[in-house]
Image: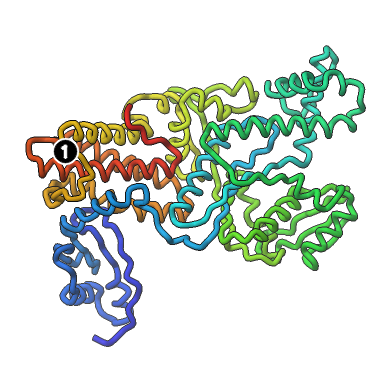
Amino acid sequence: MPSVEGPEVVWEYPSEPGFGDLATPVAFALARSARRRPRDIAEMLRRHLDLDPQFVDRVEVGGAGYLNLFLTKAFWQQVIPGILTGGEEYGRSRVGAGKRAQVEFVSANPTGPLHVGHGRGAAVGDAVANLLAAAGFAVEREFYVNDAGTQIEMLARSVLARYRQGFKMNAPLPEQGYHGEYVRDVAAALQAEVGEKFLDLPEQESLPAIGEFATRLMLEEIKGDLERFGIHFDSWVSEKALLSRWGPPDRDRLVAAVRDLFGPNVYEEEGAIWLRTSAFGDDKDRVLIRANGEPTYFISDCVYHREKCERGFDRLINVWGADHHGYIPRVKAALEALGYASEPLHVVLVQMVTVLRGGMPIPMSKRSGEFVTLAEVMDEVGTDAARFIFLTRRSDSPLDFDLEVAKAQSMENPVYYVQYAHARLSSVLREAEKAGVPGPYLEAPLALLDQPEEISLLKHLALYPEMVEAAAVTYEPHRMPAYLQNLAGELHGYYNKYRIIGADRPLSQARLALVSATRTVLANALTLLGVKAPERM
């Protein structure tokens, strides 16, 4: 056989137990260079592999040339000491050590309460940040406050109308205004603070102050809901403050500023100022300043992402609603036009949430007038259920959230199913203390863990660090609830079949070591999702 340069050996987890614990298609890559059948290459490799018999039971050639490794029970049993000694650190890695990541998420307009879509984005963003931190990154969580632009003016006009109505004046809401009951609440708070101050003032004098007042109140409510949801941000960045660095929004000043930012990539056409984003991968050029002198939202995006890059993050992760999909190429193009690489920017898209009750869509919120609020969902099902269920599907897939399922104290409720597994194991360990078989079980005779269900549990525990790292680097936190549900399923099946604490003390110690390790992994994974691991249920 001629000498060839060896390819990278990629290991896979076979879907069928008959194909081993690990499999590699490396023979196929070698066969192309050596001009031999993959199965012949695989057979040759199998004969010459020098593997530790303590951990590798046998190697077989499968199919057209896969190498299938069957690992020993001793290999899987050795995972337990690592978990018991690692404790809360088990599953963490150093893959991101020395790197900084920023996760910007929620970033809701402060024009109304948070809705369930914002809640899903909050759960996704926070879980991504937790996973990146577990992978060794230094992580900063940021909320970008969209407190500038026409939506703030429209909020002010809506509040002004309700404020005047509070004084029995004929003041219809703007057609494109905000109609939820929360606007009445803001107007009532405004009246309580300023009395009749804005009744006689011209709108152009009163609207800026009313907009600032309303924005402050709505932002306080948003912060309160997020705090209750277990979300804590390291920084809050104001769009208004960013843009104010250019001074008053005078057209000449804006034009000079964007030309200074983008240089020759800016041009004027039909009175508007454009950025040549098509030169950097976008499908067309984008307007920065309209012909009437009004800046577009795109200017804010450009300034904000330039400011992010200047802070020196190695990774920029934005969690956006799926309706912002089209913004990704233009923001990446803007970064290139500003002289920054676009590769560090990754956008996680979050699809809509449909709230159901018993399988049927529920009516809109009375308070918002348009959507179900996050606060209402937390009131009904609690924070843990909301956060876990928000993460059970890929973020870019629509999610049906059934309130009755989320409240059910049954195995049909995914978060109850997982939390109950942790509480059940906590109970077992308390009973072990009473029975005189206390932990930490580091000297337990693990060779006694030889039942198929025990080996299956051990395999799940061994995969946990890899699962955390994969979920972190792909920004896919939905992998974790799926892993937890599988692990809980293995645990419940094992618990129902075998006695953990019995007359055989060595066997009891071994099984308690397995129980303790499983409980640790359940707790660690739930913590990464921002969900509590209860001791009792």
Label 1: which secondary element: loop
Image location of residue 29, percent across then percent down: 32, 74
Judged left or right of residue 311, residue 473 is: left
Residue topped by disc 1? 437
Q: Residue farthest to the left?
A: 503
Image location of residue 164, percent across then percent down: 83, 18
Q: Quadrant of residue 49?
A: bottom left
The mark tally for this picture is 1
Q: Amino acid at mark 1?
A: Val
Please say whether residue 414 is visible from this viewpoint: no
The front one of 149 and 246 is 246
Judged left or right of residue 205, residue 394 is: left
Residue at 43% x, 31% y: name it.
385
Q: Residue farthest to the bottom?
A: 2
Judged left or right of residue 210, residue 495 is: left
Q: Quadrant of residue 280?
A: bottom right
Position of residue 228 relative to residue 325, above or below, is above
In the rendered image, the quadrant that contains the C terminus is top left
Residue at 75% x, 56% y: name it.
286
Q: Quadrant of residue 492?
A: top left
Image location of residue 528, percent across then percent down: 43, 44
Q: How was this image coloured? A: rainbow
Image location of residue 192, percent across then percent down: 77, 19
Residue at 76% x, 44% y: name it.
240
In the rendered image, the quadrant that contains the N terminus is bottom left
